[in-house]
Image: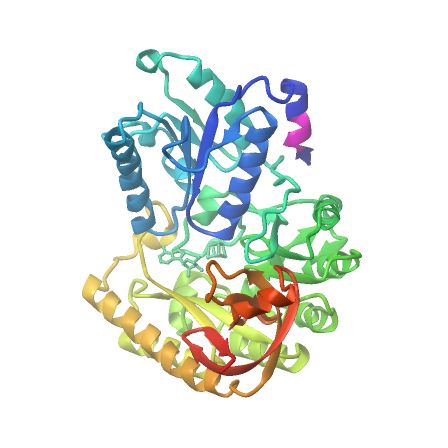
Amino acid sequence: MADFQSELKALAKPGDRGDGCRVFIETYGCQMNVYDSQAIGGLLNKDGFDTAADIFEADVVLLNTCSVRELAEHKIISRVGEIRRQRRNAHLPSVTVGICGCMAERLGDELQKGNNRVDLVVGVDNYDKLPGMISELMATQTATRRKRTATGHRTDAHYVAPPVIYPVNNSHLVTIHKGCDYKCTYCIVPYTRGPQTEKSPQAILEEIRTLVETGATEVTLLGQNVTAYHWQKEMDFAALLESVSGIEGLQRIRFLTGHPRDMHQHTMDAIGALDKVCPWLHLPIQSGSNAILKRMKRLYKKEEYLEMVDYARQVVPDVTFSTDIIVGFPGETEEDFQATLEVLRRVKYDQIFSFKYSERPGVPAAKLADDIGTNEKKRRLAEVMALQEKIWNVEAAREVGKTWTGIVEAPARHPGDSWRVRTPNNRKFVVADNLIDQGLKIGDEVSARITGFANTTFLTGE
Ligand code: 5AD
Ligand code: SF4
């Protein structure tokens, strides 16, 4: 596996390409993009580019994008127009705009046409080219600029975010692999992010050790299918968790996202047995109907999923679950939809992320008629969300009166605001800001008695 940060050293001495050029990165979509944006920032800073605080301060704006649903892509296209407009209204010169991430990979040169065209298109495996591409662009007169694109998959391109404290909810993101080898029929990810390619255990452990040396206490292992991690024949995800647990000074390990099919009993045994591994499983079910699951090519049946949940509850103390759901997949009948609601009643998730099916060009499901009307999709989405709220309100009420312990992840913004705390099983509670006087800071452990809740946030104090 190549480490492009060290390769870049050979290409240019730090500071001689960016020459103070200021770059602002706006991130959309999943945690993988959040990590990638950190890595892009690291590559650019290393090459002498500065970080801009906003689009107004920037010479270059990079949008790190998501293609998972059509609406997400539309928003990006309008954002390009909006950025240019906001700059014009502020009487600032026209800015260089680049698209990175999944949309760059999916649409390539297309993004350099039309009203909201951009100057630069760089896909998920080509970020090491960004410093060179930007400096070439900046050295050329606007009128004679050639548009630049770098896309296409490379198995050697694993970028490493710099070991700066960049926590997201006090957790440092660490990508363990990229891409996806499943072919869920609705999903664009296997095309935009390519085949599943692992970072080596050595590289992962080194990255985490470096983070711990800089003060990190918690990591979130990231991947499209972390549960499918396998390094040659020697290490699967359970074994990786065990190795990461061995890192001295590291206190908590979370991971996102698992595929239910790879959540084996021995993986759950490991999660339950390893003290540092947090008991929170985000396991997208997508649908509770076996007919739909089959058409989605999810490779499990509802019954198997439920068995897995039951097993996890036996072996992982205090485990909580969250999930993703798609409503209105082609051919989803009312009965299919009701089966999804039934799963919600049975599992009692802490949180669900539900989406209306969005047809993506070129994926297998695009051959099926997108036959559930927009209004019906909206109705189903609203119903899923309302049921979840009802279920959650009953579950959350059971927690009132208990004392919870968690880690402070965000400070109060203003006097009187509360501090946000996260428990190992990913529940949030808030504590009063007068704890500041007692020296409370981010990363500290705090215990409090739960007195109520508002949506998914628990309240403490009077
Ligand atoms: N339409 C709607 N939702 C989708 N997802 C993925 N592809 C689509 C699509 N075409 C959802 C899935 C996935 C989450 C990240 O996004 O629920 O788990
Ligand atoms: Fe998409 Fe399925 Fe891969 Fe998840 S597992 S990224 S839903 S193809």
Q: Quadrant of the N terminus?
A: top right
Q: Against 422, is 230 above or below? A: above
Most prominent secondary structure in the magenta stretch? Answer: helix
Residue that appears at 56% across and 65% down: 261
Query: Horizontally, is 420 left or right of 357 in the view?
Result: right
Q: Against 121, is 404 above or below? A: below
Closer-to-camera residue (164/314): 164
Disc count in the image? 0
Q: Coloured how? A: rainbow
Query: Horizontally, is 309 left or right of 70 in the view?
Result: right
User: Which residues fall within the magenta stretch?
Assistant: 3-7
Residue that appears at 46% across and 30% down: 23
Q: Against 15, is 377 above or below? A: below
Closer-to-camera residue (201/141): 141
Q: Is residue 6 magenta?
A: yes
Residue that appears at 58% across and 53% down: 222
Closer-to-camera residue (38/65): 38
Res 183 visible: yes
Could you say which quadrant of the image residue 326 lies in?
bottom left
Q: Against 145, is 125 above or below? A: below
Res 282 visible: no
Could you say which quadrant of the image residue 293 lies in?
bottom left
Q: Position of residue 4 (x, y in %)?
A: 64, 31
Q: Is residue 284 magenta?
A: no
Closer-to-camera residue (119/214): 214
Q: Position of residue 15 (x, y in %)?
A: 60, 21
Q: Position of residue 33 (x, y in %)?
A: 49, 46
Q: Position of residue 64 (x, y in %)?
A: 43, 40
